Amino acid sequence: MAFLGLLVLPAAADAARGACVAGRPGPDCTVWKAKVLSVNDGDTLDVDVLRDGTSSRRRIRLAGVQAMEQSSYDFRSRQGDCHAVAATQRLETLVRRSGGLVRLAAKDAESRSRGRFVRTLAVRSAGRWVDAGARMIREGRALWWASTHESAPNRRYSILLQQAIAAQRGLFDPDGCGVGPSAASPLKVWVNWDADGDDTANAAGEWVKVRNLDPVNAVPLGGWHVRDSGLRRYTFPTDAVIPPAGTITVNVGTGGPGELSWGLDDPVFENASDDERAMGDGAYVFDPLGNVRASMVYPCRGVCSDPGQGSVALTADPRGRRESITIANVTAGPVDLDGYVLKSPPYSYAIDQGAVIPPGGSLQIDVGGDPAEDQPLERHWGLARPILRNKGDIARLATYTDITLACTAWGDRTC
């Protein structure tokens, strides 16, 4: 049905203006009513837009929603990834309860993805329009897919997804597709989504790390894959193994020694933003059965906290070629900084295993120097030139979900 991408969805004379997301405050969009002709999968359906002067079939892609992929779309023999058919059936149920009538909205009538019109979708429930995308994500039926052009649902959907993960609903039931391999070995994943400099040209600056939290058993990763909220995935080689308490790194571009290479020319992970677009993304590790075994969605929104908050203080010395940033432990116990990131935009320094600051101690990170000369309480960023602006700059210690632990600023900058 490739011809669908060539059709124009007209802003008919009687098309209304209304909330971009039904029942939610926010910007106005163009709104259409439509009759659903078919539900193709958990995020795509075909409709006939009412009172537009045509009876054309138009393919709609739900804004902000990414269901698992189907491989067979015939309603009598649907197949696909685990959770894919269940998501399609759930969307069908919502549409059926709405009598087949839906509300579509878009900021830009020409917003498209792969030829499909991108729209927020609402269905009737208890006499009012309710956001179908929010229902799908709240129930763990789909991932949050941040939309640049139709961004109205982004903030809410990211919060709903983080709540679904915490509650282990739907996709995030760790054995919802059956008990997978190494089921007793917990995993942690985090992603460096903000590559240094112009990260649209720095795929190698993005990476995903997967940590095996099991101190005894290794986790073989043959047949597993990691993906973002789009359709981009990296399948681990058959001999990939995470040792007990170990970590494996997948570089989005070409990795260095000890890293796996995704081999892409362009970055994968959307940068987070706290503006009206509320952008972000996630990294998801799937086992061969289709279970999500670890995930990280960023930035954290809603109720966000980290155990490290209040445990450290930052100071910076921006002078000359001896630039450094010092992280001081302000607690009575040791502070482990493994898995945190030091940022002085557009640069970031990943803190890895072994960075434990004793009570009353501090860790100095020199901007220059050779990382091969690192000591337990002195690290080297390894940059070739100074980066801290003397007249004013900022340094921030944060989680990869963008929760700030500590910040320092000077001159014309503020935290």
Image (cartoon, grey):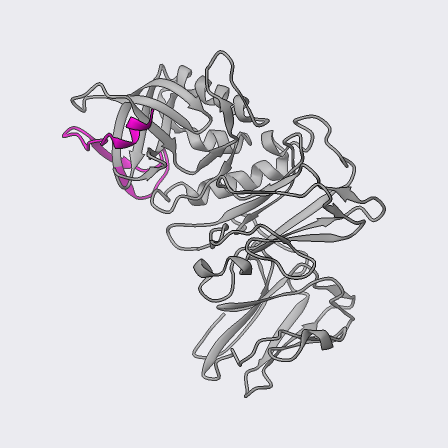
From the viewer's perspective, tell me whether residue 146 is left or right of residue 31: right
- Residue sitting farthest toward the right: 216
What percent of the width, then of the height, locates residue 247?
72, 53
Residue name at image x 43 percent, y 38 percent: 64
- For the point 45% across and 22% down, which residue is it? 91
Q: Is residue 294 left or right of residue 194?
A: right
- The foreground one among 111 and 131 is 111
Residue 353 point in image, percent of width and height: 74, 62
Instruction: Write the residue at 47% across / 26% down.
Output: 42
- Magenta segment's dominant SS is loop
**Could you say which quadrant of the image residue 21 lies in?**
top left
Residue 268 is situated, as x and y percent measured from the top left of the image, at 50, 50
Asked if residue 150 is among those painted magenta in the image, a careful observer would answer no
Hey, which residue is sitting farthest top in the picture? 76
Give the number of callouts. Answer: 0
- Is 391 displayed left or right of 49 in the figure? right
Q: Quadrant of residue 315?
A: bottom right
Vertical placement of residue 147 versus 98, above or below: below
Magenta run includes residue 5: yes
The magenta segment is 1-29
When the figure is inspected, residue 75 is found, relative to residue 401, above or below; the finding is above
Q: Give the percent coordinates (x, y) of residue 328.
A: 69, 74
**Residue 326 image-quadrant placement:** bottom right
Instruction: Give the quadrant of the N terminus.
Output: top left
Q: What is the residue that sits farthest to the bottom in this orientation?
A: 320
Kindly identify the residue that appears in the image at 76 percent across and 53 percent down: 246
